[in-house]
Image (cartoon, grey):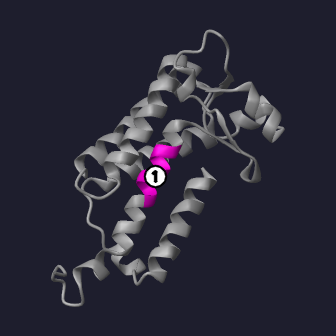
């Protein structure tokens, strides 16, 4: 999701302009970060290698399990700003993907962005056109972002808000504590 990365970079730049620092962001202490790395490496590895034994059902299982590992990481770090919000966004996406076996995409976005289904499948996991049988359609990919040729769901917006909030708060953390590490009065 290129847009999430763009949002994180823009938020970091704004926070730096307000006196924050990337050092403060980098110094953020989190528990069990290896869960995120393991999940992302497994997802990317299977996506790149595309092993013959990886059926649609197994791909969905891997996607759900690895994303639940990331949600677990966020739950373990719930006191870190933005983690609960980001985890909620990821859970919204998992709910619609699990209910449908893929991320449903509104026909409207195909017209606005001028993309076809094969381009969506290249996005990282299976997508499908939204139909009358789609479960939880309002949680699917229904918001086109034409300049980036991306399609977002409500979960994507909540996830991006959580990541943006995390980057903002952690980039400004040192400024908020003051020069000597003591909270400002």
Residue 163 in magenta stretch: yes
Furthest residue toward bottom: 179
Residue 22 percent across, percent down from the top left? 42, 78
Which of the pair 74/158 is nearer the observer? 158
Q: Is residue 151 left or right of residue 139?
A: right
Q: Is residue 32 above or below residue 87?
A: below
Magenta part mainly helix, strand or loop?
helix
The residue sitting at 55% across, 45% down in the picture is 44
Which of the pair 138/27 is nearer the observer? 138
Q: Residues within 10 Å of mark 1 (few under 14, many from 20)?
A: many
Q: Is residue 36 above or below residue 57?
A: below
Q: Is residue 4 left or right of residue 34?
A: right
Q: Is residue 148 left or right of residue 58?
A: right
Does residue 115 appear in this view? Answer: no
Residue 20 in magenta stretch: no
Residue identified by numbered label 1: 161
The residue sitting at 34% across, 77% down in the picture is 24
Furthest residue toward front: 185
Q: Is residue 163 above or below residue 53?
A: below
The residue segment tinted magenta is 157-164
Q: Quadrant of the C terminus?
A: bottom left
Residue 81 percent across, percent down from the top left? 30, 58
Which of the pair 53/40 is nearer the observer? 40
The quarter of the displayed image where residue 31 is located = bottom left
Q: Secondary structure at mark 1?
A: helix
The residue sitting at 43% across, 56% down in the picture is 163
Does residue 87 appear in this view? Answer: yes
């Amino acid at each position: 999701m290129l847009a999430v990365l763009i949002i994180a970079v823009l938020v970091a730049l704004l926070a730096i302009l307000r006196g924050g620092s990337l050092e403060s962001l980098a110094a953020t202490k989190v528990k069990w970060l290896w869960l995120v790395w393991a999940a992302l490496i497994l997802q990317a590895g299977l996506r790149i290698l595309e092993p013959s034994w990886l059926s649609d059902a197994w791909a969905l299982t891997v996607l759900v399990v690895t994303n639940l590992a990331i949600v677990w990481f966020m739950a373990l770090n719930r006191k870190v700003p933005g983690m609960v919000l980001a985890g909620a966004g990821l859970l919204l996406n998992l709910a619609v993907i699990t209910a449908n076996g893929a991320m449903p995409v509104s026909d409207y976005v195909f017209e606005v962005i001028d993309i076809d289904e094969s381009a969506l499948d290249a996005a990282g996991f299976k997508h499908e056109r939204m139909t009358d049988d789609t479960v939880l359609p309002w949680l699917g990919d229904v918001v086109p972002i034409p300049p980036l040729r991306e399609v977002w769901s409500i979960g994507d917006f909540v996830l991006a808000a959580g990541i943006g909030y995390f980057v903002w708060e952690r980039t400004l953390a040192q400024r908020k504590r003051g020069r000597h590490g003591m909270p400002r009065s």
